[in-house]
Image (tube, rainbow, N blue to C red):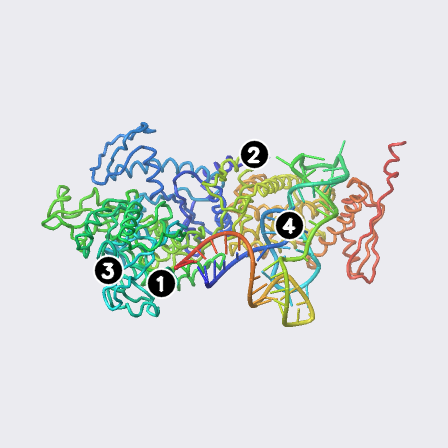
Amino acid sequence: MLDGLDQVWAQRWEQDGTYRFRPAERADVFSIDTPPPTVSGSLHVGHVFSYTHTDIVARFQRMRGKHVFYPMGWDDNGLPTERRVQNYFGVRCEPALPYLPDMPVPEVPPAKGAKPLDVSRRNFVELCEKLTAEDEQAFEQVWRRLGLSVDWSMTYTTIGEHAQRVSQRAFVRLLHAGQAYQAEAPTLWDVGFRTAVAQAELEDREHAGAWHRIAFHADGPAGDTPVYIETTRPELLPACVALIAHPDDARYQHLFGSTVTTPVFGVEVPVLAHPAAEPDRGAGIAMCCTFGDLTDVQWWRELKLPARAIIGRDGRIVAQAPDGLDSESGRAAYQQIVGATVFTAKERVVAMLRESGDLDGEPSKTVRPVKFYEKGDKPLEIVSSRQWFIRSVDHQDRLLERGQQLNWHPSYMRARYEDWVRGLNGDWLVSRQRYFGVPVPVWYPLDASGDPVYDRPIVPAEDALPVDPSSDTPPGYTADQRGAPGGFLGDPDVMDTWATSSLTPQIVCGWEEDKELFNETYPMDLRPQGHDIIRTWLFSTVLRAQLETDSLPWTDVTLSGWILDPDRKKMSKSKGNVVTPVGLLEEFSSDAVRYWAASGRPGTDTAFDQGKMKIGRRLATKLLNASKFVLGFPEPAPGAGVTEALDRSMLAVLDDVVAQATAALQTFEYTTALERTERFFWQFCDDYLELVKDRAYGDDSDPATQSARLALRSALSVLQRLLAPFLPFATEEAWSWWHDGTVHTSPWPDPATPHGTATSAGDPADDMVLAVATAAIAAVRKAKSDAKRSMKHPVQVLRVHGPARFGPLLDSITRDLTRAGNISEIGFEPTDAAQLDYDVRLAAAEALDSPART
RNA sequence: GGGCGCGUAGCUCAGUGGGAGAGCUCUCGGUUUACACCCGAGCGGUCGCAGGUUCGAAUCCUGCCGCGCCCA
């Protein structure tokens, strides 16, 4: 019954432009900053889960009369795409090569064992664009199938020209405002990808190593007693610039201010005090090298130590021995490790220490947390390089205030943002030594000897953006001056993916390009996203909005949880437990998969559960069946009213459901809304419908019949609309049976007058009527079930005992009960009991059997 | 080490001061004219543990245990 609906209606919505954004005043718009999924590979159930949540909210707001601004983007910029393109086409980016406008697309797949084809950066980027365009088509098909009510005419990509222009414009403005700057500084460096990485992209991993106890030779007051330090990185010994202990450490007081000499390399270094030294760790005194970790950087900066860098960008020991390594024996030792990887250098230095007798005992194995780039597979090194930064530390206090102003769903997620902002220990590094990204939009003049003048960058005019400095020529220069003395050099770097995606509100809302649209949509209403990217996407978006427009980018943020496999582990490709979305949509229907997704509350990790999808499918089918049944009765006569107490009672209970569902959806608690609606819907089907069915079949002239038919249709209309955000396909199908327009732009039931139907004047509707009728029919069913009889089996008498005030109430439902339960006689006896009690006597079995015998 | 969240029936989860609940599973029953992709009934819990507040605690407070995540 459900099968086939998905495609039919998805196509229809596209034809009719059902979800097209229609401009309106800001107050009438609900704008959503949809996360652009990374386009490298395929969507998985986690995407389906969280995007459904947002769509439910979008559909609710649309029915509430809002003009919903709901674009989709694709994040195709960045490393994952680069890697894929290299393998797919067998190419390698060589930025020094010139652009070939007519370069043929390489054959796919590339010949086995062939050397990668070197292509210019622009040609490489074009290949990236070609491949991502194909993936984006496939993604869009899945989203349409799932029923996301996105306006597809507004789709953007983070590498597209528009996004590049916005990204570069914002960067240029920050540059002019002094909020973006470049600096030569120690930078976390991934030797595998050969790029700098930002603080936000780090993760700690357990890494095996060994403590080496090494003797430094004392020169001063301590006499010739060696000073022992313990380190896991002996290969950095030639980069040592000081020994450092805690200022309160009694063991080293006598050494502070003196110097010691490094073993093997023979460099004299000071012994200094600094509170970051940990007395409990190793020997309590550490060697500070440039640079082994971030503490070294801190010491180097705060104690104004010299730099003795020995690790290059390729992760190998550089040829040039550092300053200060002057002795002949020291230089000879250094030659032993030049060009070696960190791993090999470590072995050789340890061998030399062993030979000189400065290694005390044997290394002892340890496992400790080491910083990695989240996408990398080798520990990060720290190398000195020129990079671009955006100021963020200066804005810490303001950013914390912004976090307070933002409404978080769930609210406890705010703490993660605050943790991150408070812990910022440097500005945001935005330049990356990669290719498929938005270029840093500056050039540098070259002086007479051909060296770049970094502190006088040539910045393009805003109306010239976007630019690619590696192929475009800066104003005032000619192309042949590129690289020539007195000419220019393009900045070879691109910006970090987050430097562009932090501007999604500006990209979609037409910042500086479409003033009207911007006024209608910005600041946005909602940012939905995963809680794992609070420190990256959420943080950086708040920062950019702060810097560009001194505003919050949105008023509310919803954080979705993870999908867990049935063993409560996070689902991931490497575990091989990922299920493809399309298969699920085909097997269970889109509505069913959405129903499962809706069971995951904001911020809550949710188990992948096909059982839930089956139930969703059941609900959608039930809605179609119940709709068919209700609409099968003749339309109520004009002027008909809901006169029966039971009908009015049912509508009153429904009113309450509308109020609860509406309140829940307004605060993004879609799960609660669905739960309340669903519970009522099944009671409506199982109890109310069964109770009034006979009356609804009655004579057109009977007002009680008219009352039932009208109440049924009124309730059905409300229920179809309440379920529409969750089950857009089944509700649309059932709605189409009796309406011309789409349910998805029909008005959400108003909590004030939810069913829009006049009930007869007089007593207020009594919730208790439905409750008593339901309890009575349940008692009858139980009696039949206990006796193992059919539900059709006649009941001789139903006797109800209880408070006298229920007498009239019972009278009002006697007719419906009699028919629904096949009851011969219903009696009421007032008692002192507080509650009603039901006594059911079934007709004798023989009475039923006897006709068969005659 | 600091912080956040979670712990309720076999499973998935609601319930935040006053009757311990739902769905699924399981068992039993039902050719009911919307639906067998259905309907009805039933079985099933020491609400993680310990203490405290209260007339009353799954719910509030304290401590502990377990799981997950964030930050260092």
Same chain shared by disc 2 and disc 4:
yes
Tell me the crowding category of disc 4: few under 14, some 14 to 19, or many 20 or more residues within 10 angstroms, Cα based. Answer: some
- Hey, which quadrant is residue A106 in on the image? top left
The numbered mark, 2 or 4, whose residue comes first in the sequence reads 2
Measure the C-alpha gap from mark 2 to mark 4: 25 Å
Mark 3 vs mark 2: tell me if same chain.
yes
As displayed, is residue A502 above or below residue A472?
A: below
Which residue, given by chain and number where applicable, does mark 4 sit on? A680
Instruction: Say which element carries label 1.
Output: loop
- Say what amino acid the circle numbered 1 marks: Gly
Give the chain letter at badge 2.
A
Q: In this rendering, which labeled residue sits more in front, label 4 or label 3? A: 3
| Residue A3 marker | 2
Circle 3 marks a residue in which chain? A
Disc 4 is attached to a residue of which chain? A
Coordinates of residue A572 in the picture (x, y in percent): 46, 43
Q: Does dot 2 land on a helix, a strand or a loop?
A: loop
- Name the residue tied to disc 3: A261
Does label 1 or label 3 sit earlier along the sequence?
A: 3
Distance CA(mark 2)–CA(mark 1): 70 Å
Circle nearer the viewer, 1 or 3: 3
Q: Report the disc number at residue A284.
A: 1
Q: Is residue A679 visible to us here?
A: yes
Residue at mark 4 to residue at mark 3: CA–CA distance: 81 Å
